[in-house]
């Protein structure tokens, strides 16, 4: 590994793939690829290609898995209502995808709005009766919007060229003490490092140009602090990499990957049906506190 400077970005090169380097950027405080794709390249990917070429089965599988997704979403809305009360129920979902998160909230009585750049995903969510703006979250869209009590951003921040800029825009749209909930992949986590160092896996989670940024719990929390947020809860998702450690290699194998995902869903649904969802939440909170789990999920509040 060695250091190199790309204009304002500087850091140790961790990995290289398809003409991109992943650096542990001293300037940004988190890992990201260089060169960073242009806005024009990203618009082409996310407006028309992402749900057709990159994730063609995403919407169909989200519909198949809706019972499990509703459990995930219910926990998030439960937390929002616990902190804010049920009357502060205006929510914006940035990168709303097929819309099931917003649909869950609408059924609970929340006032919902989504922003989604993909024509396919935006059209699908509109067919569910949801209020969706088709486009990228930027200054022009912000000027059209009122304030929100909650902003939700699931698997978005890893895709954008300037995460700090996006968080500043989100900050401007939140009411005082409003909640920002972010979920991003937990990359370069301890399980992944063990698989690379001991089991000769290549770093399969690196996916340029779609994934630009690679966060862990500390780097994302530090970025949120810089933008005026206070993290009030660390959470995560099932540490799916544990199947790889057990010898089930799903990398590049959609059938095995789907089987592992079904096992993960069965695990969580069974605990819920047994009345042990609170136990599951405590377990995942412990995972988050030691840096494992497939996703970094942070709940933060606007404090200034």
Image (tube, rainbow, N blue to C red):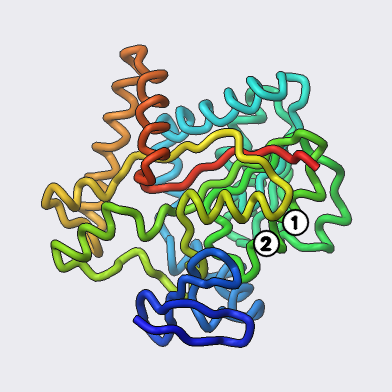
Q: Is residue 64 visible?
A: no
Q: Quadrant of the N terminus?
A: bottom left
Pinpoint residue 180: horizontal percent, then vertical percent. 66, 42
Pinpoint residue 216: horizontal percent, then vertical percent. 45, 54
- The residue at the point 48 percent across, 30 percent down is 70
Q: Is residue 274 visible?
A: yes
Residue position marked by numbered label 1 in the rendering: 168
**Label 2: how many Cα within 10 Å (few below 14, some 14–19, many 20+):** some
Q: How many marks?
A: 2
Residue nearest the observer in this picture, 195 or 90: 195
- The residue at the point 28 percent across, 30 percent down is 266
Residue nearest the observer in this picture, 95 or 48: 95
Q: Is residue 197 above or below residue 208?
A: above
Residue position marked by numbered label 2 in the rendering: 164
Pinpoint residue 196: horizontal percent, then vertical percent. 22, 65
- The residue at the point 59 percent across, 38 percent down is 299
Question: In the figure, is residue 120 to the left or right of 57?
Answer: right
Question: In the figure, is residue 168 to the left or right of 52?
Answer: right
Residue nearest the observer in this picture, 55 or 301: 301
Task: Give the residue at the far top of this rendering.
Answer: 275
Q: Which mark is residue 238?
A: none
Residue nearest the observer in this picture, 15 or 52: 15
Distance Cα–Cα, label 2 vs label 1:
6 Å
- The residue at the point 51 percent across, 70 percent down is 212
Q: Are marks 2 and 1 in contact (CB under 8 Å)?
A: yes
Q: Secondary structure at mark 1?
A: helix
Pinpoint residue 256: horizontal percent, then vertical percent. 20, 52
**Label 1: how many Cα within 10 Å (few below 14, some 14–19, many 20+):** some
Q: Is residue 43 above or below residue 74?
A: below
């Amino acid at each position: 590994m060695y250091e190199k400077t790309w204009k304002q970005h500087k850091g140790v090169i961790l990995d290289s793939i398809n003409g991109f380097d992943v650096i542990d950027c001293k300037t940004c405080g988190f890992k990201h690829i260089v060169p960073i794709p242009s806005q024009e390249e990203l618009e082409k990917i996310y407006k028309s290609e992402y749900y057709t070429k990159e994730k063609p089965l995403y919407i169909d599988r989200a519909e198949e898995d809706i019972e499990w997704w509703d459990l995930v979403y219910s926990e998030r809305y439960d937390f929002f209502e616990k902190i804010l009360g049920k009357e502060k129920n205006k929510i914006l979902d940035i990168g709303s995808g097929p819309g099931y998160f917003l649909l869950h909230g609408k059924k609970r009585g929340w006032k919902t709005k989504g922003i989604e750049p993909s024509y396919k995903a935006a059209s699908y969510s509109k067919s569910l009766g949801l209020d969706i703006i088709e486009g990228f979250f930027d200054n022009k869209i912000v000027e059209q919007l009122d304030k929100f009590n909650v902003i939700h951003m699931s698997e978005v921040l890893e895709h954008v060229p300037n995460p700090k800029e996006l968080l500043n825009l989100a900050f401007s749209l939140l009411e005082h003490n409003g909640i920002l909930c972010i979920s991003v992949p937990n990359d370069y986590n301890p399980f992944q490092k063990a698989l690379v160092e001991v089991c000769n896996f290549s770093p399969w989670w690196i996916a340029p140009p779609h994934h630009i940024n690679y966060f862990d719990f500390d780097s994302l929390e530090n970025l949120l602090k810089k933008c005026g947020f206070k993290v009030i809860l660390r959470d995560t998702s099932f540490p799916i990499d544990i199947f790889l450690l057990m010898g089930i290699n799903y990398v590049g194998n959609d059938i095995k990957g789907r089987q592992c995902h079904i096992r993960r869903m069965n695990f969580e649904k069974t605990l819920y049906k047994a009345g042990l969802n609170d136990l599951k939440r405590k377990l995942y909170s412990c995972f988050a506190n030691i840096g494992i789990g497939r996703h970094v999920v942070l709940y933060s509040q606007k404090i200034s």
